[in-house]
Amino acid sequence: MMELCIKRFLITLVVYNLILFQSNAIELKGMFGEIRSPNFPEGYPRDSNISWNISVPDGFRVKLYFSHFDLEPSYLCEYDYVKIEADGQVLGTFCGQESTDTEQIPGQQMYFSPAHDMTVTFISDFSNEERFTGFDAHFAAVDVDECKEKNDEELACDHYCHNYIGGFYCSCRFGYILHTDNRTCRVECSDNLFTERSGIISSPDFPNPYPKSSDCLYRIELEEGFVINLMFEDSFDIEDHPEVMCPYDYVKIKAGRKEFGPICGDRSPRRIETGSYSVQILFHSDNSGENGGWRLSYDAVGTPCPVPQPPVNGKIEPSLKQYSFKDQVLITCDTGYNMIKDNLEIEKFQIVCQKDGSWSSVMPTCRIVDCQTPPILEHGYVEFNTRNNLSTYQSQIEYFCQQAFYQIVPNITSIYTCQENKRWMNKNLGAKLPTCLPVCGIPAFSRTKLARIAGGKFAERGMSPWIAMLSRSGSPFCGGSLIGDNWIVTAAHCLHNSLEEDRANLLSSDIVDSSSFKIILGKHRTRQQDNTEQSLQAKNIILHPQYNFSTYSFDIALLELNNHAILNNYVKPVCLPDEETTSTVLHEGDMVIVSGWGKQFLQKLPDSLAEIEIPVVDHSKCKESYAKLQRSVTDDMICAGEKEGGKDSCQGDSGGPMVTINKQTKRWFLAATVSWGVGCAQNEKYGVYSNVQKSLSWIKTVTGIYNV
Ligand code: 4AZ
């Protein structure tokens, strides 16, 4: 567009070559032209004073050349002369016909105006006697190469200069934009946002000179609660002025209501504490100057919070000398202490330093773990090893069983310590409690004399504390033995109604009703009440699976009591035999004790418990003697009694205990239960008993009882 305008202007000048007479000044506008002295080539008139104001379009200069020059010579051209002026300067004053030491003629030289206009003045004095012919000169517009000719201080273009005939234009390096002054190159830098807590900001192109004509805006926007500090590097160079405060280029900082600057010059402002979480840095540059610019690093510090005091028996992490906004602190309690916050128990707790310099929450407290009252051990008790019966962390307790009647199992340390998980723990058993198992086979009262059952003697109270009376309608019908504290071993035939001999199987309907009989422990007298007795009932009747009601093999049964017996000096269980050990395997002649309330001499029931001591009879001898009577003595049976008779169990004694002492453990064990015989106390008609050892694994499986 600009080019177009200039062209149109040139055409106008060439065509019209307008000559204006204004007093003695002639205006000449155009691309070229000719000027002559008046009357040329005749002698010029006297008293001439003519000026030609030559002007060519912008971007051009005037070139003037004299093709003829003939003026009156005079010392220092005092009379007649031609003067060339441009931009208020005299480019030359000429006279004469040839150059001398003191005067000059234009000769062949070209004269150029610095700008686009030139004035030529012709003066003649009062005479031209010799009829000098004057001059003939030509002017033309010549292009100015602005790209080359502008001096260093005033460069035509900031970056790249492109000359064309009649003008020039500028362009910028990549990343720069030509300013509206069409000369300087600015940058677009008004939208720089920093949201990190630290960073580096510099003037564009740092450390190279910053762009001209630019307005840069750098914003640091952090969360409320932080304050931003700026640190300008020492290398700082912004164009300044000796008298006026930063008139050209400057940095201004706005931080909330505070303002810093304008800042310029070569002295770094160094550290600026803005006191704000939102900072704007404005950097303005004008269209000139070459200065190195600036660079700063910034950081942000949060509002400080007071150093938190850890709870008693607790700690905080991290433990620092100072805390500020956004810092987090984890609070934990020492081992054995629980954290309490708002009356609630929590694992751990975190607090955060807030923008106002306070912590997000008050400290929780650490309360010592309390394992509470230890669990109750059945048939046992607990003792606190610490004073005041403390149940808190690290307190110790010890379990014991009721002495004489129960024994602790396993018999290792039963010390429990209160752990951080609020549980009482034993180093071997963990949280599991030991058990108090009934002590078996140790009567409180030892035997002095023996009574007889059939032809026997009366027992003394408490000598067979394991014996149970099975009683129906106030009359004893069978005996039994307490094992553990809730199982009775008795004879299977005591628990079913009489059956026809030829029936193959026992039906469940044949089993007696458990509510139809009583199981009395601590019993001594046959018909009268004893103050030591405990009357119980069976909740379960279990006959040996191999029980044969025709042969009486495996004539053994288990009764589960509806309640646990209370063990005391009159109620104590008997031991079971050991498996396959010599100490509890009976041999011929081994003495055993059989007790019961069964019939005695003349079919009479005894007044109180009777017992006999009899020898074990060789199995084959017994078998032989019964073979004569067509009765079979199977392997699960054991016989006892004296050859000549006299001492025997009898009707009513069935299910009752045959015991003997384990020589190793010195404890009484249940060797057999009273089963059958032919008659009572007759010679060679030994009493037949069900051998407990043969049913031992079944008993243990059903009851879970084992000797302790
Ligand atoms: C019975 O009828 C019985 N002499 C028990 C034992 C003996 C005989 C009979 C052994 O219960």
Image (tube, rainbow, N blue to C red):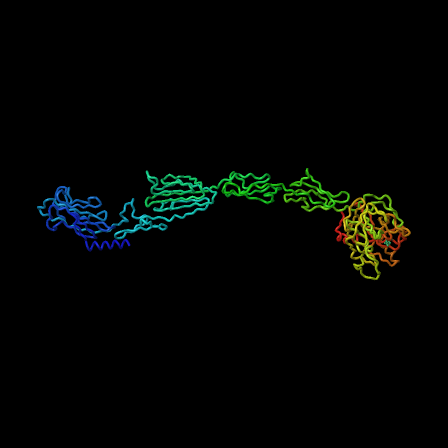
Total count of labels: 0
Q: Position of residue 231 (x, y in %)?
A: 42, 41
- Which quadrant of the render holds ligand 1? bottom right
Residue 107 seen in this snapshot: no
Residue 15 in the figure: left or right of residue 501: left
Residue 365 in the figure: left or right of residue 640: left
Q: In this view, does 512 lie above or below 83?
A: below
Q: Which of 654 and 510 is in front in this view?
A: 510
Q: Quarter of the image for the N terminus: give it.
A: bottom left
Quadrant in the rendering for residue 319: top right
Residue 395 seen in this snapshot: yes
Q: Nearer the viewer, residue 454 or 538?
A: 538
Residue 246 in the figure: left or right of residue 120: right
Q: Where is residue 379 in the image (x, y as percent from the top left)?
A: 74, 45
Q: Which of 51 and 356 is in front in this view?
A: 356
The residue furthest top is 387
Q: Position of residue 308 (x, y in %)?
A: 54, 39
The residue furthest right is 602
Residue 369 in the figure: left or right of residue 355: right
Q: Position of residue 544 (x, y in %)?
A: 79, 56
At x 38%, y 46%, the residue is: 216
